Image (cartoon, rainbow, N blue to C red):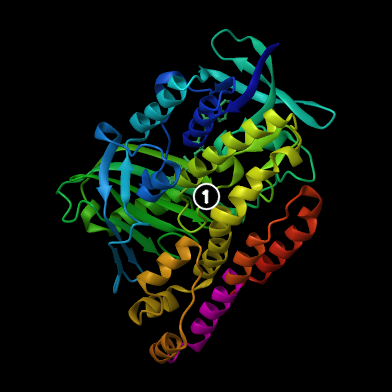
Amino acid sequence: MKKSDVVIVGAGSAGCVTARRCAELGLKTLLLDRKPQEEVGQKVCGDEVSKTHFEATGIDYPEGDEISSAILGADVYPPNRKNELQVRGWTEFDGWTVNRLIWGQRLLKDAIDAGVKFLPNIHVAEPVVNSDRVIGVEYKDLESAETVVVSSKIVVDASGFAAVIRNKLESPLIENNIDKEDVALCYREILKLKMPLAEPEVARVFLGGEIAPKGYAWIFPKGVQEVNVGVGITGGEGRGSPKSHCFKFKEQYPLLFGSKVIDGKGGAVPVRRPLKSLVGDGIAFVGDAALQVNPIHGGGIGAGMRAGIILGEVVRGAIAKRDLSAAGLWSYNMRYLPNFGRRLASLEVFKRLLQAVSDEDMNFGFERRLLEAEDLMAANRGDGISLSIVEKMKRVKRGAGRISLLMKLQKAAGLMKKMNKAYSNYPTSPDRLDSWEKSVLSIIESATFK
Ligand SMILES: Cc1cc2nc3c(=O)[nH]c(=O)nc-3n(C[C@H](O)[C@H](O)[C@H](O)COP(=O)(O)OP(=O)(O)OC[C@H]3O[C@@H](n4cnc5c(N)ncnc54)[C@H](O)[C@@H]3O)c2cc1C
């Protein structure tokens, strides 16, 4: 049996950032991934990441070959593709599309340089549990076919959507049945276009039940003549596959006609609030394994990196205090959930609103500007949608004829506010988690907009 202070399962962006922080703080850190080392970072993704996440974490900006394209704005299209919302000059939106492999290799190198021991070609099978506490993991070395048990003070599950450790743990603190309504199934292609892009630094997002049921389609620039195009849909069966929706979208969008497919693959991403607790006894979760993803657009790179920095510091503190229990790790919940987690949770309400609005109402809303770019940004920041009385009156006038749509907007704004408040009151210890969870679930249950 090998020994470590912390074992991190998964060397995606969240795992690498967590591992690096742990090693920087002097912990003996082991990072495991089933991929060969040269493939770490490779990921089916839209590849877009906002600059704000780097500013919040102190992680170096992507540079050189790590960058595919700068992103300096977005156009959001309603189902009829008229009256699009143009978002420009908003720092929350601006950033880059990255080359996932090259940038992922840099994150791994940063972790190794900080002192992390990395083992590639390792399939982690399950947690090792003793008296309800996680004390290590069992893995298979895919090269030697040897089965190994490694013991550690803390295990971090950073295995992405698969959540290989979380899904094998049973504890009242740990959620492992994620509703399929809360998972976006996606298909994306990297395309070489026939013509250069007119605005090579603008991302495009397309809403509508036909294009992407309960989801959206995207075109993100990857260079002047290359794009990342994809469709994400939620809601389980009966809606067609994301691949078929993506193919249909490509046939309808002239910019994409005659383009050459460089790569095409499917993937999945959770799209709901983060786990109610990011920790258990001897275990913590980060990245997609912790459902740290923006429910509106499925962006999880930044949300996981932010969490990784906090988690590294909390793990260091718990080990120093020799308290490896959920209570000893609780400050990870306290530092993440009422802050960035609050944002993600209130956006789940907004997602539910967007999913319920008909294409016709959506077209009307865009035409009459019932929501402005500023509202979207405020919602994205976690500030909810808060309109002054004068502004409300103006929108009521613009929305005349669709009062029910305005009322849905009003209801969503109220519930987002409630969600913000609930997360600001996240319990300070595990024993109050149940009653807190009930309050959150009651907000989610009210978030119906029929
Ligand atoms: C189609 C699509 C488009 C997206 N677009 C964007 C976007 O534009 N911007 C954005 O911010 N986010 C986007 N996301 C989400 C984003 O990709 C994820 O939130 C983010 O990559 C999660 O990082 P992670 O480190 O948690 O997990 P991952 O990057 O999935 O890393 C998990 C790692 O764990 C390893 N692993 C898994 N199981 C095991 C095991 N049993 N043993 C050992 N290792 C294991 C994997 O090999 C992998 O390296 C998108 C997702 C999809 C599917």
Residue 356 falls left or right of residue 396: right
In the image, farthest residue toward the right: 131
SS for dot 1: loop
Q: Position of residue 419 (x, y in %)?
A: 62, 66
282 vs 217, nearest the viewer:
282
Residue, x 36% and y 30% (percent of image)? 101
Magenta segment main secondary structure: helix
Q: Is residue 272 visible?
A: no
In the rendered view of the protein, which quadrant contains the N terminus?
Answer: top right
Please say whether residue 410 is one of the residues in the magenta stretch. Answer: yes
Q: Position of residue 85 (x, y in %)?
A: 32, 69
Mark 1: which amino acid? Val
> Label 1: how many residues lie within 10 Å, few (<14), some (14-19) or many (20+)?
many
> For disc 1, does the CB lie below 8 Å from ligand 1?
yes
Q: Is residue 304 above or below residue 91?
A: above
Q: Which residue is mark 1?
A: 293
Please say whether residue 401 is one of the residues in the magenta stretch. Answer: yes
Extent of the magenta region: 400-416
Q: Position of residue 125 (x, y in %)?
A: 66, 24
Q: Is residue 353 visible?
A: yes
Residue, x 42% and y 26% (percent of image)? 110
